[in-house]
Amino acid sequence: MENNFGTPMSPGAGNAREEVSLPAILLMVISALGVLIALTSFFTPALMNTLINNPSLPADLRDQLAAQQGGASWVRSLPLLILSAVTFFGALQMKNLRNYGMSLAAAIIACIPCVGSCCCIGIPVGIWAIIVLRRPHVRAAFT
């Protein structure tokens, strides 16, 4: 079996681009969902303030909403936004076979439960991506 350059390929070596494609796309989808969740939690306090200040709501309901609001949602959502963005960028690099370290970091971040992208959905995809990235012919394909 020969590649496009006329040099023999090892028989067990598959096409690295095809192997990383699906895990990379799934990581991008999961991280995009994480970004959406983080952005939603950024804007939730503004919506809650609008509801609390609505004079047509009963006073006891406004008090319950105020008690549930909590403070500083950006403290919770900013790390999720940053980690999801890093995961998306690393998955994009993986799909293009560039920056092996960033690709591996994105796969590892996806494996961290309730910290990475979309809670536990990212764990199996992250493990799959790590397994694919650790294959010698895939690692050699990165520029």
Image: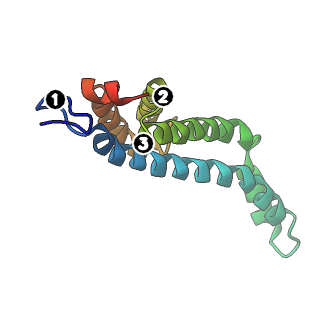
For residue 114, say whether it is visible: no
Placement of the N terminus among the 4 image quadrants: top left
Instruction: Tell me the amino acid under the disc marked 1.
Output: Pro
Question: Distance between the Cα atoms at labels 1 and 3?
Answer: 24 Å
**N-terminal-most mark, 1 or 2:** 1
SS at circle 1 = loop
Question: Foreground mark, 1 or 2?
Answer: 1
User: Neighbour class for label 3 at 10 Å: few (<14), some, many (≥20)?
Assistant: many
SS at circle 2 = loop
Res 18 label: none
Out of 70 and 19, give the one closest to the viewer.
19
Instruction: Tell me the amino acid under the disc marked 2.
Output: Asn
Q: In the image, what residue occupies the spot 74% across and 58% down?
A: 65
Residue 53 picture quarter: bottom right
Q: In the image, what residue occupies the spot 34% across and 30% down?
A: 141
SS at circle 3 = helix
User: Neighbour class for label 1 at 10 Å: few (<14), some, many (≥20)?
Assistant: few
Q: Report the residue marked by disc 1.
A: 8
Question: Distance between the Cα atoms at labels 2 and 3?
Answer: 10 Å
Q: How many marks?
A: 3
Question: Foreground mark, 1 or 3?
Answer: 1
Report the side of 90 relative to 26 (left or right): right
